[in-house]
């Protein structure tokens, strides 16, 4: 019998695994009803992550007033900058949250506190390294993606600013991930909300100028992102240092086992994240080779909606990391599996609804950013063919976060590799055979369907657990 089929409609009474001194927040992760607890933790994340994503749209809307070259330049930089967010918050950040959650679930409070310093050290180092990569090789990277002339110049102007401040993004997400690992989603969300409120007026002021403030054009949008990120760091650092957090930042000797506890999940997650971004970057290059900069602008604008699903699913996925990780740490495997499958179903419904709406009314989205005919044509084709597969992307991504909590990322890595091969190699073959971008986009949609169904089937079968654990789950 499969693990899914054997699970009852209602969870069986849970064993009281919490010790007398366990924090009430941790106890709720171990014993609270799954759907209410998941939604209670998710709603501030979802709300504020969507607000944060909306500021990216607002910034894109302001930049679109600078012309198609600026819009294309931003489309070229966006995959790389989103890669930094996905790595620092979703991949390494997920490893941080998972390690903290598992330590708290096993009642290892000293290790949970020590993980705060280790998280900061890891993210500061990776932030500096990735900043150097884009600052030194930005022209080659964006040129390979189809940037040329004025669009390439615009990309470099924006990129040089945001990647100069990239280390702040990594530090902010290290602190936020530590707090999320304790089951507290509200404080990181409120810090991000404060940054959003500041970014909305700051971005146009720096882009177009106001009073004594000079117009910085597209670079002004990048500077606004850097300044508001610094504000978020100040809020999160205050919360941890004030002693209000379940875990505390303490000076102490750095220990390799704690680095390994974060990186054994985060490093594999980083490879999975690189697969996703590389898929978008390579398909952007395909579109650029076939249709030029205007087609890249259309594809980039359409694909931005797909990227917006990431913070939406992250809003649900971050609680899944904490819930699954804490229950795995406490030995409650059956409950951890139920949490993963429940969260995956919720993510599918939400993202599929968005995808279908985008496929039916593509110009409602695209017209927000421009009216170039080729841009609209390319973006419409993308949304009509890929939008209906968004639900499977949401399903797979949510189960990736759940797998981070379980500390088992082999299957998400494999599913992501299969997706990349179908999208890039298959997309190239279809484009070479037909010359049609529409059929290439259909291949991208197929890749998402395979990604989601493959990962859901594997996790439902119990691949997280050893054979003895799987038998125990089947008997329960």
Image: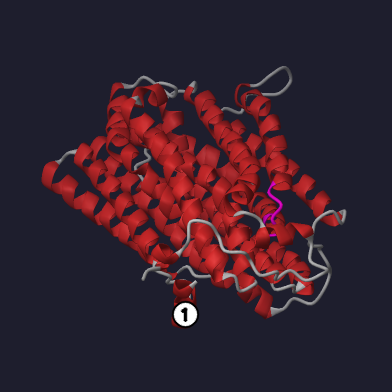
Instruction: Specify the segment rendered in magenta.
Output: 180-185
Measuring from the top left, give residue 218's x and y in whole percent: 55, 31
Does the stretch in magenta take in 39?
A: no
- What residue is pinned by disc 1? 466
Residue extending farthest to the top is: 211
Res. 95 in view: no
Looking at the image, residue 382 sits to the left or right of residue 82; the answer is: left
Looking at this view, is 202 or 134 the one in front? 202
Query: Where's the N terminus, which quadrant?
Result: bottom left
Measuring from the top left, give residue 245's x and y in whole percent: 80, 56
Residue extending farthest to the left is: 433
**Is disc 1 placed on a helix, strand or loop?**
loop
Measuring from the top left, give residue 261's x and y in whole percent: 62, 73
Looking at this view, is 145 or 58 the one in front? 58
Res. 127 in view: yes
Q: Main secondary structure of the magenta part?
A: loop
- Give neighbour class at mark 1: few <14, some 14-19, many 20+ (Cα, 10 Å): few
Looking at this view, is 221 or 327 the one in front? 327
Which residue lies at the image location 33% right of the left edge and 43% below the top edge? 389
Looking at this view, is 200 or 336 the one in front? 336
């Amino acid at each position: 019998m499969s693990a899914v089929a054997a699970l009852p409609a209602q969870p069986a009474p849970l064993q009281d695994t919490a010790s007398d001194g366990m924090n009430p927040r941790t106890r709720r992760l171990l014993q609270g009803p799954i759907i209410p607890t998941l939604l209670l933790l998710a709603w501030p994340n979802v709300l504020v992550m969507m607000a944060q994503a909306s500021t990216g749209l607002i910034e894109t809307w302001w930049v679109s007033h600078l012309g198609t070259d600026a819009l294309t330049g931003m489309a070229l930089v966006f995959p790389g900058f989103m890669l930094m967010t996905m790595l620092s918050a979703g991949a390494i950040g997920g490893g941080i949250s998972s390690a903290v959650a598992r330590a708290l679930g096993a009642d290892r409070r000293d290790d949970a506190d020590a993980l705060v310093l280790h998280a900061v050290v890891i993210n500061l180092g990776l932030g500096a390294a990735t900043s150097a990569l884009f600052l030194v090789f930005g022209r080659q990277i964006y040129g390979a993606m189809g940037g040329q002339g004025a669009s390439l110049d615009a990309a470099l102007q924006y990129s040089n600013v945001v990647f100069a401040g990239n280390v702040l993004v990594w530090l902010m997400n290290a602190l936020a991930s530590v707090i999320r690992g304790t089951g507290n989603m509200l404080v990181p969300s409120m810090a991000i909300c404060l940054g959003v409120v500041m970014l909305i007026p700051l971005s146009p002021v720096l882009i177009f100028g106001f009073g004594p403030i000079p117009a910085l054009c597209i670079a002004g949008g990048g500077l606004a992102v850097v300044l508001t990120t610094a504000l978020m760091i100040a809020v999160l650092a205050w919360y941890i240092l004030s002693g209000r957090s379940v875990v505390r930042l303490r000076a102490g000797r750095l220990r390799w086992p704690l680095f390994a506890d974060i990186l054994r999940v985060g490093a594999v997650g980083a490879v999975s994240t690189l697969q996703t971004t590389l898929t978008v970057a390579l398909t952007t290059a395909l579109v650029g080779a076939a249709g030029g900069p205007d087609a890249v602008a259309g594809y980039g604008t359409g694909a931005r909606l797909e990227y917006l699903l990431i913070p939406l699913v992250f809003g649900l996925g971050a609680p899944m990391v904490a819930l699954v990780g804490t229950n795995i740490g406490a030995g409650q495997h059956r409950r951890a599996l139920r949490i993963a499958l429940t969260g995956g179903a919720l993510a599918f419904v939400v993202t599929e609804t968005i995808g279908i709406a985008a496929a039916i009314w593509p110009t409602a989205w695209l017209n927000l950013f421009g009216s170039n005919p080729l841009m609209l044509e390319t973006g419409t084709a993308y949304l009509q063919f890929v939008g209906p597969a968004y639900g499977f992307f949401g399903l797979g991504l949510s189960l990736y976060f759940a797998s981070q909590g379980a500390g088992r990322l082999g299957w998400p890595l494999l599913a992501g590799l299969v997706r990349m091969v179908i999208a890039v190699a298959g997309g190239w073959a279809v484009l070479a055979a037909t010359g049609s971008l529409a059929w290439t986009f259909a291949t991208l949609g197929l890749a998402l369907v395979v990604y989601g169904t493959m990962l859901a089937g594997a996790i439902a079968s119990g691949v997280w657990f050893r054979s003895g654990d799987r038998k125990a789950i089947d008997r329960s």
